[in-house]
Image (tube, rainbow, N blue to C red):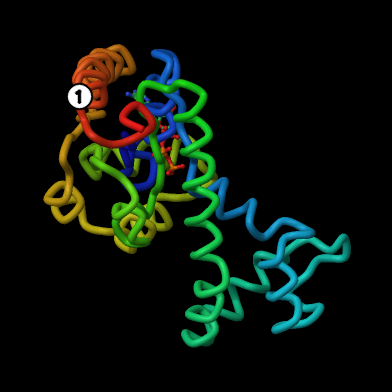
Amino acid sequence: MIVGVTGGIASGKSTVARAFAALGVPWVDADDVAREVVEPGEPALVEIAARFGQRALLANGSLNRRALREIVFADPSERLWLESVTHPRIRERIIAHLERLQSEGAPYVLLVSPLLFESGQSEMVDRCLVIDVPESLQLARTAARDDVDDTQARAIVAAQMPRAERLARADDVIDNSGNEADLAVQVAELDRRYRRIAAKAPWGTRSQ
Ligand code: ATP
């Protein structure tokens, strides 16, 4: 069984993933995989370099993320092209990572993705777990963690999927407005439920 974990900026996705990991449940981070597929030597980076030339690369041959962001920001058709090159590879590799973890005996696995719904990755999972916090707390935790001011933090939150829409798509919700101990209680409760469901369900490596 695969549980997709999502939430807005600084909602606590990584903190939640670590809490599940402490109970023996591994995760795959979709952002890490998105970086992996454009590392030097990867076919996607070769294609990007062929299309945009040296301006898309840094001197050491790795991806110039900033330049690429500017290119696709200026031209939506280039964004579509880029997504057509990267998304299938990200998807393929996420599946490979998840299958490896399942075959290593995980009771179930997590796919942690800030854009679980927006990217269509929710289609790859059996359940969606949304980490929910009030916007005021999201802003406070963003400002405390990142080097951004309140205006920047508000702009990031405003550009993301609205809280109500995310919640409407959730199968399960963690309320992360309390402290880490409150969070651990909710994670332990969900873990018990997920183990029960995964043991019974006709999916994943258990049934194969
Ligand atoms: P992003 O998507 O922006 O990378 P995230 O959703 O993975 O963020 P975290 O990095 O887990 O969020 O948490 C954001 C910040 O809030 C961190 O500094 C973390 O330590 C803090 N935090 C998370 N949960 C709690 C909590 N329950 N109590 C106090 N601080 C918390």
Q: Position of residue 134 (x, y in %)?
A: 21, 40
Instruction: In this rendered view, identify the residue nearer to me: 125 or 38.
Output: 125
Q: Say if 42 sits above or below 6 in the image.
A: below
Mark 1, ligand 1, within 8 Å: the answer is no
Ligand 1 lies in which image quarter?
A: top left
Residue 107 location in percent, x, y? 36, 21
Determine the secondary structure under disc 1.
helix
- Position of 106 compared to 120: left or right? right
Q: Is residue 106 placed above or below 166 in the rendered structure?
A: above
Seen at 44% across and 14% down, the residue is 22
In this figure, which residue is indicated by the disc labeled 1?
Answer: 200
Nearer-the-camera pick, 55 or 32: 32
Q: Tell me which residue sits at (47%, 56%) in the image.
A: 91
- Quarter of the rendering occupied by the C terminus: top left
Q: Position of residue 62 (x, y in %)?
A: 78, 60
Q: Nearer the viewer, residue 148 or 57?
A: 57
Disc 1 residue type?
A: Lys
Residue 27's x, y, as percent? Answer: 45, 32
**On the picture, is 12 further left or further right than 37?**
left
